[in-house]
């Protein structure tokens, strides 16, 4: 049996899944949160918390909620969090004696230009991840903390880093180069890196498999639309352009991020509004996007506002869709036509209104979304375009944890 533990570590939390790779079934999923924020009593709203779900304990996945266990207790650091996880496995299952991990896969946000494939973690790799923290100061240090805690907890199995940026290492120079002073850019590693690569890779491969067509023969556009959002042009399974840039701030309108903006706006706000660099960073990353336009960051709230003719929500929705259409058109041109367009992640998988509006103006290109198919709500991959559409439009549920597990197992077995 080949079992892989997948870890996604943040600064004060980490998520995990234990996956049986022989069947690709999830054995357990969990969340350790509020690390280092425990209240003195170990209980209450300020306490650290561990929640684990074992879908196999009480039967099929439909009874998953019956197999969810939550515990509040002090968890001072990530290492303590992993000990709590082990205690939960021992008490609630699955038993790691019965399902021992053969490898641990770690999501790492930024691999810079150094890492273009899943990589066996060594001390040198840790040093490189730490060095790349300058490009992702909110993410890489947290990812690294989880890696170190996990390697201490599971010292006898390989640990593999899977980088969000790796899939986009196939971008051509024309797509990843910014038109600024070349020496300055090189000195400070300024270029487009792209993100959500694990999701874009999983979805594009799943789409090809679903359609029964070779990945190498397809041109695809994948919209990963969640609170963070990006779109990627994929030619033959290779990323050739993507909306996020040196950081995840560039590109589409997001829940709290502005996406594309004239850089001179920042100079103007610094001079006229006396905003500091840190204040501008906070503005564009945490107080912009849908939140900045309408006061809410969740697309469901935006759509509810549109339904009641709220002007701010309607404008926010229109701006969001305008940006989607702009990128879709640009990427169709870059690819010379597109065989498949896929929508994924929270908004992409669940908002029929967003999907329909995003492609409403592309009838000239022969793209037709079927209203009934688009409104249908069911799991799994599904076609939402008409039979006459020249481009197949899909909804493809993403599974980044499974993709990380697949890449991890490949490295562990090599």
Image (cartoon, rainbow, N blue to C red):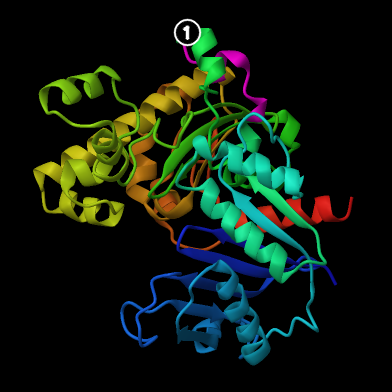
Does residue 148 show up? yes
Q: Nearer the viewer, residue 152 or 234?
A: 152
Q: Quadrant of the N terminus?
A: bottom right
Which residue shows up at 70% across the image and 34% down it?
116
Q: Nearer the viewer, residue 58 or 94?
A: 94
Q: Relative to 188, say whether 3 is above or below.
A: below
The magenta span reads 169-179
Is 303 displayed left or right of 387 in the figure? left
Give residue 4's position: percent from left, percent from top.
Answer: 74, 65
Does residue 397 show up? no
Q: Secondary structure at mark 1?
A: loop
Which residue shows up at 51% across the image and 16% down it?
185
**Magenta stretch: residue 306 in it?**
no
How many numbered callouts?
Answer: 1
Residue at numbered disc 1:
181
Question: Quick one: which residue is furthest to the right in this view?
Answer: 414
Give residue 409's position: percent from left, percent from top.
Answer: 80, 56
Give residue 195's position: percent from left, percent from top.
Answer: 53, 38
Which residue shows up at 56% across the image and 16% down it?
186
Give residue 389's position: percent from left, percent from top.
Answer: 51, 34
Q: Quadrant of residue 111?
A: top right
Is 363 displayed left or right of 398 in the figure? left
């Amino acid at each position: 049996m080949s079992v892989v533990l997948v870890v996604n570590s943040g600064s004060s939390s980490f998520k995990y899944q234990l996956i049986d790779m022989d069947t690709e079934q999830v054995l357990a999923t969990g969340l350790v949160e509020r690390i280092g924020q425990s209240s003195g009593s170990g209980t209450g709203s300020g306490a650290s918390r561990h929640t684990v779900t074992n879908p196999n304990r009480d039967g099929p996945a439909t009874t998953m909620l019956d197999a969810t266990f939550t515990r509040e207790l002090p968890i001072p650091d990530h290492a303590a969090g992993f000990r709590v996880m082990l205690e939960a496995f021992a008490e609630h299952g699955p038993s790691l004696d019965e399902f021992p991990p053969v490898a641990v896969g770690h999501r790492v946000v930024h691999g810079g230009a150094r890492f273009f494939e899943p990589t066996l973690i060594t001390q040198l790799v840790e040093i490189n991840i730490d060095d790349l923290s300058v490009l992702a100061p909110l993410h890489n240090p947290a990812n690294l903390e989880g890696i170190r805690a996990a390697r201490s907890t599971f010292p006898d199995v390989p640990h593999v880093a899977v980088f969000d940026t790796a899939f986009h290492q196939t971008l051509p120079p024309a797509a990843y180069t910014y038109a600024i002073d070349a020496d300055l850019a090189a000195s400070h590693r300024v270029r487009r890196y792209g993100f959500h690569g694990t999701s874009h890779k999983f979805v594009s491969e799943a789409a090809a498999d679903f359609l029964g067509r070779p990945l190498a023969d397809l041109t695809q556009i994948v919209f990963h639309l969640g609170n963070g959002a990006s779109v990627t042009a994929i030619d033959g399974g290779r990323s050739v352009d993507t909306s996020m840039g040196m950081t995840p701030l560039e590109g589409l309108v997001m829940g709290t991020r502005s996406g594309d903006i004239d850089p001179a706006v920042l100079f103007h706000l610094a001079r006229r509004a006396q905003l500091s660099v840190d204040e501008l960073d906070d503005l564009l990353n945490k107080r912009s996007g849908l939140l900045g336009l309408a006061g809410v960051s969740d697309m469901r709230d935006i759509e509810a506002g549109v339904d009641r003719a709220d002007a701010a929500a309607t404008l926010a929705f229109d701006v969001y869709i305008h940006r989607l259409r702009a990128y879709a058109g640009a990427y169709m041109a870059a690819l010379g036509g597109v065989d498949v367009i896929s929508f994924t992640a929270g908004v992409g998988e669940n908002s029929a209104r967003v999907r329909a509006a995003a492609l409403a103006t592309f009838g000239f290109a022969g793209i037709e979304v079927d209203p009934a198919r688009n409104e249908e709500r069911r799991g799994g991959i599904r076609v939402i375009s008409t039979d006459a559409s020249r481009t197949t439009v899909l909804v493809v549920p993403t599974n980044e944890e499974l993709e990380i597990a697949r890449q991890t197992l490949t490295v562990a077995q090599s």
